[in-house]
Image (cartoon, rainbow, N blue to C red):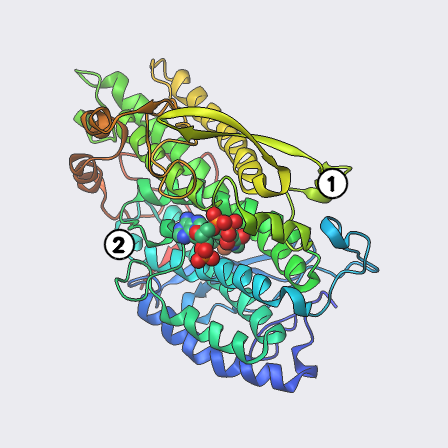
Amino acid sequence: MTAIDYSSKIPNNVDLASDKRLQRALETWQPDFQKWWMDVGPDGYQGADVYLRTAVSAEPSGWAHFGYVKMPDYRWGVFLSPREADRTVVFGDHAGEPAWQQVPGEYRNMLRRMVVTQADTEPASVEQQKRLGKTAPSLYDMRNLFQVNVEEARHLWQMVYVLHAHFGRDGRDEADELLARRSGDADKPRILDAFNQPCEDWLSFFAFTMFTDRDGKFQLAALAESGFDPLARSCRFMLTEEAHHLFVGETGIDRIVSRSAELTRRSPNGLASELGGIDLDVVQRNINYWFAFCLDLFGSEISTNAAESYAAGLKGRFREEKRFHHHDLRDDYFVVPVVEGGRLVDQEVPMRNALNEVLRGDYRHDCERVVDKWNETIASHGVDFKLSLPSTRFFRRQGLYRDSFFNPAGEPIDEDTWNRNRDQWLPTEADREAVMRVMGPVTEPGVFANWIAPPKKGLGGKGVEFAYVRFD
Ligand code: BYC
Ligand code: FE
Ligand code: FE
């Protein structure tokens, strides 16, 4: 069941051939997907040979095969993690009942909304990253960008499979809509705000793969616990691909701050930009910006949607089954600071309603671990500068804190104070220009742009100097 069939039009390990209707429906969607990829996928390089990995099996171990592929020939397909025998619903009001193999009627709308929201982010990210190939700091980085892009496009396939296989006509309509919305479009934008933000330079790309793909890690992990088994199995395999996206973001920023620290030390006035690098305070402001946008992706601190999807057994906590003994939470409470008359006051709310905030907390913790590593890198160059994450209340546009102003420490401030300090806390036009000035393509194997340190090692069994993309 887990071996991938590459002989059919749509590679899969779900025995698509035995369901002719479904196979035909997906084959009808396929040309529209290909058209979408050519329209709003990577700008240029579609004829280049890119050293990409392709899944050979959906088992957690050893699934990747590496080789040169032209992106339009990438074998996008449907790969579900192996089915567990006798799996039951792990949490919520149906705990202990057999996991659903078909959509439970009473939860159809809730599930559809969740699948569509998840699905929508995947093509959105490809659209946001469309132009980055043109300014790649090396062939190694260009290859990583394209790897992330083809895999996000595969995640779209994965979710479209769930829609086609389990939501009938509505599912097919939703699948079409996924190719009709566009990141940043005034009339038909993507669903979640972070996926409508421009991502035009590589500092933003690395911040995106660090912070936004990490939201993906936590959301996919929460859905991987789902009592709706096809969704759980879809998300499990997507998570194994996600690890590389996070690696790209985490090491990308680490390599930037490594070079920035080195240049800061060597420059006459202690500014990396004097020697063609990116100043560390610009990096900090970009962290503030992307981190805050990604916090919004977890939804409101107090949410009936969150309570209902946990009760229904459809969306769990991070590693629900392994990490916790109790999976009900009906009698538990969680303290959330709410704004009252310009001050923060602790409020006790039912735990199920606070699960967005709980997941956001796990996310923040995971991000902090990475920021600590970046700080070790900076310190190793003997530079006295510390990066940090702002409070989860800072610069929020969703949830409880959206209508108030907070400084990066999370203290309430008035609007004047916000306006006076904004340029210290969030990227300015001048920051963006400074970053864009140092961007520029480097396409010679083994050579890296001046503003970023080379990686410690190569990928897919190759060295750093390998020609990860070939043009001719
Ligand atoms: N922007 O009860 P609330 C990834 C809406 S990333 C705009 O507070 P809920 C990836 C919300 O829709 C992972 N609107 O929140 C990464 C609702 O609207 P309606 C993506 C927002 O529902 C990189 C209203 O506000 N996966 O995979 O508890 C590259 C009140 O909602 C936003 C998922 O998100 C926002 N930021 O939680 C590629 C998982 N936030 O219905 C890929 C599926 C909230 O009142 N989604 N709203 O009109 C979910 O589980 C939930 O829908 C959310 C929100 C976590 C998004
Ligand atoms: Fe994804
Ligand atoms: Fe990703």
Q: Quadrant of residue 449?
A: top left
* Label 1 or label 2, whichever comes before in sequence order: 2
Cβ of mark 2 under 8 Å from ligand 1: the answer is no
Q: Are marks 1 and 2 in contact (CB under 8 Å)?
A: no
Q: Secondary structure at mark 2?
A: helix
Which of the pair 218/398 is nearer the observer?
Answer: 398
Q: Position of residue 388 (x, y in %)?
A: 40, 24
Q: Secondary structure at mark 1?
A: helix
Q: Position of residue 227 (x, y in %)?
A: 71, 57
Q: Amino acid at mark 1?
A: Lys
**Label drawn at residue 322:** 1
Q: Amino acid at mark 2?
A: Lys
Q: Residue at x 59, y 62 (%)?
A: 111
Cβ of mark 1 under 8 Å from ligand 1: the answer is no
Q: Position of residue 179 (x, y in %)?
A: 40, 71
Would you call the spot at circle 2 few (<14 residues within 10 Å), some (14-19), or many (20 or more)?
A: some
Disc count in the image? 2
Q: Residue beneath label 2, please? A: 134
Quadrant containing the N terminus is bottom right
**Label drawn at residue 340:** none
Quadrant containing the C terminus is bottom left
Q: Residue at x 29, y 58 (%)?
A: 184
